[in-house]
């Protein structure tokens, strides 16, 4: 019923002419045929934005720095999240190379990696520039965790291959991250489809958040797992803290003002979250038994004792590719629905999440 | 025994104080009464303070005590046998050998029956690490039989370390991400992950090693006078040297198995102990190494867990602290030594 109601909602006028509404790490403005694109914070501590000009048509004889010709037909995805964005638009067929097939969840792209119609080109210092030069992509989509990683892409830029560094991972709001699909839509000439998809996701996300707001209980949530006795706890301004707030959870570090992680001692986390109702994302282990083997002290947590430990590994392949990081970036409404079900419902019919077995 | 009769009581006091300091302070601040109850019983056993003390701070402090004492003596044994002031478990490639043993075990784990692994508990890890340490040590010994100057020996240790590192790197390349992570966590080194059962295994191995080392104090003293003098005193030099190095492998291997590589303690403690005792007699120096090692590692651990300014603290990497103490100490002794010889 709910999904019908959402789909029936009117889609706003062409959004792509307007800049992003949620995203903070990117800005774009259209004038005529040209879109001026600015990735404001391409990585943590970036000194200046990365500027791009998106133009229609085939590249001219002399290409300017940051110039991208649209629509991009042959695309290289150096991060799985880009495959997720393209697949959400039904355009995964444009992918001609990925960094590594084992990083990708999408079944279609994986099958094409297996039959070698999609190449594996590595990433960072292991990027196989020569193979990329041979296939002449229209566009390479990449993430950069810092200036040096961005600089390693310069070899491609110098060779005349357009590289667009995206920063959806820098967004600390789930809807902001998902809104990057609108940019990807512009790149492949499917703006209308991307805008309507995003509007649907946005409405669905808000509906779930409203559902969570209506709940009386606010279960407490513990996040992550320690490295030996150091526990990187997601800060109060982080993506996860925002998601948990929207899911109607009480997060013990909600008042913290950090966007990234806060390093704490194991005992400090125990002191604050021993009686948390739910434990999310232990991530290194996939059954309670394995967790106990890693550290028997996990059984001090109430959520562990009750077995209320969940991770987003329901759609994870044995080699580690996890759809949560891929389609989950475009569908925060689905992620939120899972969390609302875990926190306020029976924890059943989950999509990305799974209650860890004994 | 020593020039200062109060030295050993003072060292013992230092160990006890460092132990209490390590237990009393952590990222959560606890009152004196809570610490007392946690240590000596009383209060609700499920109370947070009791859980923190008994499951977090005590196992860590016991591990620091055992590992500090063991590494101090292991370093001493290596320095006497290789006649090099720069010998230590890390410097001679012994820690890397232990690492190779641990990496091989982690890689082989999926091939072994899980029931067997569960039944053996922490023993396979200790065994793999001690075997790796022993193999590296014997290799150094074989090289030492040909080159006796300490610079070449250290270079050989460095080569063994980098060969082990390369082998580990290749293993990591062919292993899956989760196993890789377990290994890389181990490689950081630290005492926070040592559980009670692991502590028991580590303490058993280190206990055997320390008793054996103390029992061999007299022939050890004889070898300090030179091989021919030792032989004249009835020591079978070659067999004795292998025995001593196997003891050092047991000590360094068992400790490295559970704590990961710990920097500088094995190297710096014998120098500190010598400076305090001012005698070269192993019968005095070895107990001093144990006490100084234990006190130093306890102190480093306490510092790494000191509460931050906001009260809710993190955990600094232990090796950063041990290096901060160890590197200047070793430099100081080196400079003083060269000053004396020139």
Image: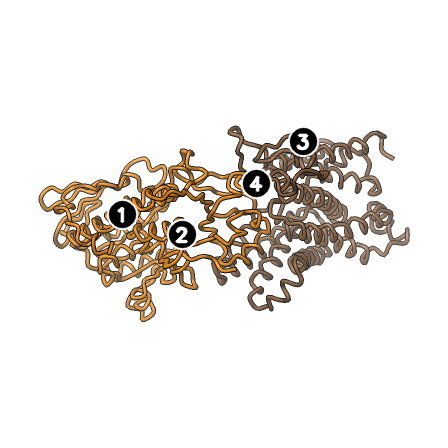
Chain colours: A orange, B brown
Residue that label 1 marks: A207
> What element does badge 3 sit on?
helix
Label 2: how many Cα within 10 Å (few below 14, some 14–19, many 20+): many
Q: Which mark is residue A267?
A: 4
Q: Residue furthest front?
A: A216
Q: Is residue B133 left or right of residue A188?
A: right
Residue A294 lies in what quarter of the image? bottom right
Name the chain letter of the residue that bears numbered label 2. A
Q: Are marks 3 and 4 in contact (CB under 8 Å)?
A: no
First in sequence: mark 2 vs mark 1 = 1
Query: Does mark 1 fall on the same chain as mark 2?
Result: yes
Looking at the rendered image, the quarter that the N terminus of chain A falls into is bottom left
Residue that label 3 marks: B33
Q: Are marks 2 and 3 in contact (CB under 8 Å)?
A: no
Q: Nearer the viewer, residue A112 or A62?
A: A112
Instruction: Report, in whole angstroms, how far the alpha carbon at label 1 lies from the one at label 4.
Output: 38 Å
Instruction: Report, in whole angstroms, how far the alpha carbon at label 4 lies from the one at label 2.
Output: 26 Å
Residue that label 2 marks: A342
Q: Position of residue A318 (x, y in %)?
A: 43, 64
Instruction: Report, in whole angstroms, how far the alpha carbon at label 3 lies from the one at label 4.
Output: 18 Å
Q: Is residue B299 above or below residue A193?
A: above
Of badges 1 and 4, the one in the foreground is 1
Label 1: how many Cα within 10 Å (few below 14, some 14–19, many 20+): some
Of badges 3 and 4, the one in the foreground is 3
Query: Does mark 3 fall on the same chain as mark 2?
Result: no
Name the chain letter of the residue that bears numbered label 4. A
Instruction: Report, in whole angstroms, how far the alpha carbon at label 2 lies from the one at label 3.
Output: 40 Å
Instruction: Report, in whole angstroms, how far the alpha carbon at label 1 lies from the one at label 3.
Output: 51 Å
């Amino acid at each position: 019923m709910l999904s019908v109601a959402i789909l029936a909602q009117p889609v706003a006028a062409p959004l792509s002419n307007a800049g992003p509404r949620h995203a903070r790490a990117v800005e774009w403005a259209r004038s005529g045929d040209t879109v001026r694109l600015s990735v404001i914070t391409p990585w943590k501590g970036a000194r200046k934005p990365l500027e791009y000009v998106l133009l229609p048509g085939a590249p001219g004889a002399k290409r300017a720095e940051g110039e991208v010709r649209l629509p991009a037909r042959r695309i290289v995805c150096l991060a799985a999240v880009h495959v997720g964005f393209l697949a959400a638009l039904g355009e995964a067929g444009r992918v001609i190379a990925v960094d590594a097939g084992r990083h990708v969840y999408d079944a279609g792209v994986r099958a094409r990696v297996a039959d070698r119609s999609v190449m594996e080109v590595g990433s960072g210092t292991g990027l196989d520039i020569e193979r990329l030069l041979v296939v002449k992509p229209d566009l390479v989509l990449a993430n950069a965790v810092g200036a040096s990683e961005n600089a390693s892409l310069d070899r491609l830029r110098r060779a005349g291959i357009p590289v667009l560094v995206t920063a959806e991972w820098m967004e600390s709001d789930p809807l902001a991250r998902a809104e990057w699909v609108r940019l990807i839509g512009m790149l492949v000439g499917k703006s209308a489809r991307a805008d309507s998809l995003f509007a649907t996701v946005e409405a669905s996300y808000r509906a779930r958040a409203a559902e969570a707001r209506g709940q009386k209980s606010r279960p407490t949530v513990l996040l992550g797992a320690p490295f030996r006795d150091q526990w990187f706890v997601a800060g109060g301004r982080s993506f996860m803290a925002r998601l948990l707030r929207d899911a109607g959870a009480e997060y013990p570090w909600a008042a913290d003002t950090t966007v990234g992680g806060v390093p704490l001692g194991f005992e400090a986390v125990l002191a604050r979250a021993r009686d948390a109702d739910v434990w999310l994302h232990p991530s290194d282990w996939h059954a309670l038994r394995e967790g106990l083997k890693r550290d028997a002290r996990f059984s001090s947590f109430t959520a562990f004792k009750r077995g209320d430990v969940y991770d987003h590994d329901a759609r994870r392949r044995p080699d580690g590719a996890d759809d949560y990081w891929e389609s989950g970036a475009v569908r925060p409404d689905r992620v939120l629905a899972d969390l609302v079900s875990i926190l306020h419902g029976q924890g059943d019919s989950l999509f990305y999440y799974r209650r860890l077995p004994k | 025994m020593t020039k200062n009769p109060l030295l050993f009581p003072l060292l013992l006091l230092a160990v006890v104080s460092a132990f209490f300091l390590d237990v009393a302070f952590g990222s959560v601040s606890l009152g004196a009464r809570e610490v007392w109850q946690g240590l000596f019983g009383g209060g609700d056993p499920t109370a947070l303070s009791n859980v923190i003390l008994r499951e977090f701070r005590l196992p860590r402090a016991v591990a620091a005590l055992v590992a500090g004492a063991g590494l101090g003596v292991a370093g001493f044994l290596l320095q006497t046998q290789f006649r090099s002031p720069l010998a230590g478990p890390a410097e001679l490639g012994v820690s890397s050998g232990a690492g190779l043993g641990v990496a091989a075990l982690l890689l082989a784990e999926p091939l072994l029956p899980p029931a067997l692994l569960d039944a053996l508990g922490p023993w396979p890890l200790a065994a793999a690490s001690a075997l790796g340490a022993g193999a590296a040590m014997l290799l150094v010994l074989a090289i030492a039989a040909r080159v006796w100057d300490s610079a070449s020996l250290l270079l050989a240790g460095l080569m063994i370390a980098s060969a082990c590192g390369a082998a580990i790197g290749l293993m990591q390349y062919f292993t899956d991400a989760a196993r890789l992570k377990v290994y890389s966590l181990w490689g950081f080194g630290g005492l926070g992950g040592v559980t009670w059962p692991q502590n028991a295994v580590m303490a058993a191995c280190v206990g055997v090693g320390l008793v054996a080392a103390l029992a061999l104090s007299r022939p050890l003293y004889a070898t300090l006078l030179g091989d021919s003098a030792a032989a004249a005193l009835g020591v079978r030099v070659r067999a004795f040297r292998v025995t001593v190095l196997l003891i050092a492998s047991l000590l360094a291997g068992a400790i490295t198995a559970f704590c990961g590589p710990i920097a500088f303690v094995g190297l710096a403690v014998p120098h500190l102990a010598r400076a305090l005792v001012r005698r070269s007699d192993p019968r005095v120096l070895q107990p001093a190494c144990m006490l100084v090692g234990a006190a130093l590692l306890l102190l480093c651990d306490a510092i790494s867990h000191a509460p931050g300014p906001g009260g809710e603290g993190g955990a600094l990497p232990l090796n950063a602290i041990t290096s901060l103490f160890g590197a200047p100490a070793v430099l100081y002794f080196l400079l003083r030594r060269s000053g004396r010889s020139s």
